[in-house]
Image (tube, helix red, strand yellow):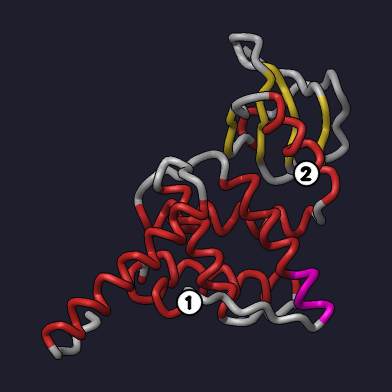
Amino acid sequence: MSQKIEKVLNNNVVLAFNESDQEMVVMGRGIAFQKHPGDEIEEDKIEKTFVPEGQDVMEHLLSLYRDIDPDILEVATNVIKYAQGVLRARLSNHIYLTLPDHLSYAISRAKEGLDIKSPLTWEIKRFYKIEHEIGLKALELVEKNLNIQLPETEAAAIALHIVNARQDEQDLQVTIKMTEMVQDILNIVSYYYGTTFNED
């Protein structure tokens, strides 16, 4: 059954209704190019669909996808696809809100010459090596597609969003606290036994 566009958010994102008459987000490169509400969605262009949970999430999504540069949204989507390929796992749909929002904010700070340090960069490199590598790849994609160089500390921040999306979207602060706690435990054990751990 063909789906019709309810609302165009940008060239790559539209709102539609699924078979259960729930409002859903449909994503795909150029899916809404020169399209209008009521037009049919070309099925071969659909890359991702999801139903936002709750009206507040839908409102945040509408605001986000209306206000953020479509090029940033595209980079964020490509990072998510890359992460899912590397991890061989699906990430929570919520990352389609949190990662574009984070990248947009990070890019704004970079343009203003502000560099906010992440206090957990070292810990994230140690405990979440694969996610940190994905974060580094994200920085490459930002530079290649948006011609903006983000500081390497941003790789750790992006990695945290990915870790969070794998943890069934627990609160990001919980993930941060958990990382800090593991580091503290390792420090205690290392000090007590007077030994240095093999980082690998």
Q: Is residue 57 left or right of residue 168?
A: right
Residue type highlighted by circle 2:
Tyr
In this view, the residue in front, 57 or 182, is 182
Which quadrant, please, contains the N terminus?
top right
Specify whether residue 111 is painted magenta: yes
Q: Residue at x 75, y 70 (%)?
A: 107
Q: Identify the residue position indicated by label 2 in the image.
A: 65
Which quadrant, please, contains the C terminus?
bottom left
Instruction: Please provide the residue range marked out in magenta.
Output: 107-112
Q: Tell me residue 148's x, y (percent).
A: 74, 77
Q: Quadrant of residue 34?
A: top right
Q: Is residue 192 above or below residue 81?
A: below
Mark 2 / mark 1, whichever is N-terminal: 2
Please, which residue is most extreme toward the left here? 193
Q: Tell me residue 56's x, y (percent).
A: 71, 30
User: Secondary structure under badge 1?
Assistant: helix
Q: Is residue 191 above or below residue 39?
A: below
Q: Is residue 123 left or right of residue 23?
A: left
User: Secondary structure under badge 2?
Assistant: helix
Q: Is residue 161 left or right of residue 33?
A: left
Q: Residue at x 47, y 48 (%)?
A: 165
Q: Of helix, strand and loop, which mostly describes the magenta segment? A: helix
Residue type highlighted by circle 1:
Thr
- Which of labels 2 and 1 is toward the front? 1
Q: Tell me residue 41's x, y (percent).
A: 72, 26
Q: Quadrant of residue 192?
A: bottom left
The CA span between labels 2 and 1 is 29 Å
Q: Quadrant of residue 47?
A: top right
Q: Tell me residue 100's x, y (percent).
A: 68, 54
In the drawing, what numbered circle is on residue 121? 1
